């Protein structure tokens, strides 16, 4: 009889402990926007306009703010996350005889770890501001594509370059709790710390260079969005 009571008590404590641990687990989806410096690639646009010397050749896009999305998993305010980012640029010209397009299309896969440090924890009855610290690795891919159309006939050339970077991403956020549903508006600043230079796929030594050295994608900029999480 005593053994049975002990066994039931043990299962109760074990179940309670698991419940408390489970409440610290969060799975979420992040959606937002990003701004990107892309200084070297913008410089290439300007240089190409001078070199081609076509009157009327214009920048129709130059790496604008664009939408991003991501996934994250946290335990007790520490976790891992993934984010996909993209943007692009275009030079364009057209007249009665044909057109010229020069596109730079960029994508960035971000993998990292994160820590959340509450300034004030009002999770039971209000808003909880926090400091957000992230860091990790990003895998960039830039596609360069040139398309010339004359008298209805088109020809194009393209080049794909990759770059691996290591980054830090400090930020701020605000936590809103609705029982098991959690909403976190956040703003952070993505800072590439180490960049190995844009290079040909499969050949890290074949790097794109300008007069200052290696050309970098450089995704430096603000990330602002909302994270929707479920506590499980």
Image (spheres, rainbow, N blue to C red):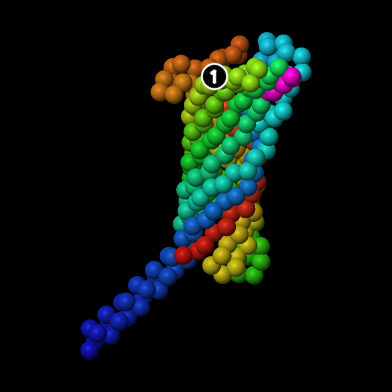
Residue at image x 47%, y 53%? Answer: 73
Q: From the viewer's perspective, is residue 70 above or below residue 44?
A: below
- Within 10 Å of disc 1 (Cα), the crowding (few <14, some 14-19, many 20+) is few
Residue 221 seen anywhere in this rendered image of the structure: yes
SS class of the residue under badge 1?
Answer: strand
- From the top left corner, tell me how far across and down residue 85 is, in percent: 57, 39
Residue 16 left/right relative to 102: left
Q: Give the range drawn in magenta.
A: 91-96
Q: Mark 1 points at which residue?
A: 157
Residue at image x 48%, y 55%? Answer: 74
Residue 124 left/right relative to 28: right
The secondary structure making up most of the magenta span is strand
- From the top left corner, tell me how far across and down residue 63 is, in percent: 66, 31
Q: Which residue lies furthest to the front in this view?
A: 151
Q: Nearer the viewer, residue 90 or 36?
A: 90
Q: Which residue lies furthest to the bottom in this view?
A: 1
Residue 84: name its quadrant: top right
* Location of the N terminus (image quadrant): bottom left
Residue 119: name its quadrant: bottom right
- From the top left corner, tell me how far across and down residue 194 is, in percent: 52, 28
- From the top left corner, tell me how far across and down residue 154 is, in percent: 59, 20
Residue 183: name its quadrant: bottom right
């Amino acid at each position: 009889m005593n053994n049975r009571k002990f066994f039931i008590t043990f299962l109760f404590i074990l179940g309670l402990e698991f419940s408390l641990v489970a409440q610290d687990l969060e799975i979420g989806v992040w959606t937002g926007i990003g701004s990107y410096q892309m200084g070297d690639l913008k410089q290439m646009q300007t240089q190409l306009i001078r070199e081609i010397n076509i009157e009327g050749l214009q920048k129709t896009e130059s790496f604008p703010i664009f939408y991003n999305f991501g996934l994250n998993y946290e335990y007790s305010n520490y976790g891992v996350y993934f984010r996909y980012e993209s943007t692009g640029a275009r030079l364009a010209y057209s007249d009665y005889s044909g057109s010229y397009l020069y596109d730079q299309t960029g994508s960035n896969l971000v993998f990292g770890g994160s820590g959340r440090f509450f300034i004030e924890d009002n999770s039971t009855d209000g808003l909880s501001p926090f400091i957000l610290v992230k860091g990790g690795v990003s895998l960039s891919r830039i596609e360069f594509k040139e398309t010339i159309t004359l008298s209805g006939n088109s020809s194009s050339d393209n080049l794909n370059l990759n770059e691996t970077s290591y980054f830090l991403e400090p930020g701020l956020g605000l936590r809103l709790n609705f029982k098991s549903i959690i909403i976190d508006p956040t703003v952070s600043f993505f800072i590439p710390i180490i960049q190995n230079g844009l290079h040909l796929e499969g050949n890290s030594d074949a790097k794109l260079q300008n007069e200052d050295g290696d050309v970098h994608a450089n995704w430096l900029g603000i990330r602002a969005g909302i994270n929707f999480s479920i506590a499980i």
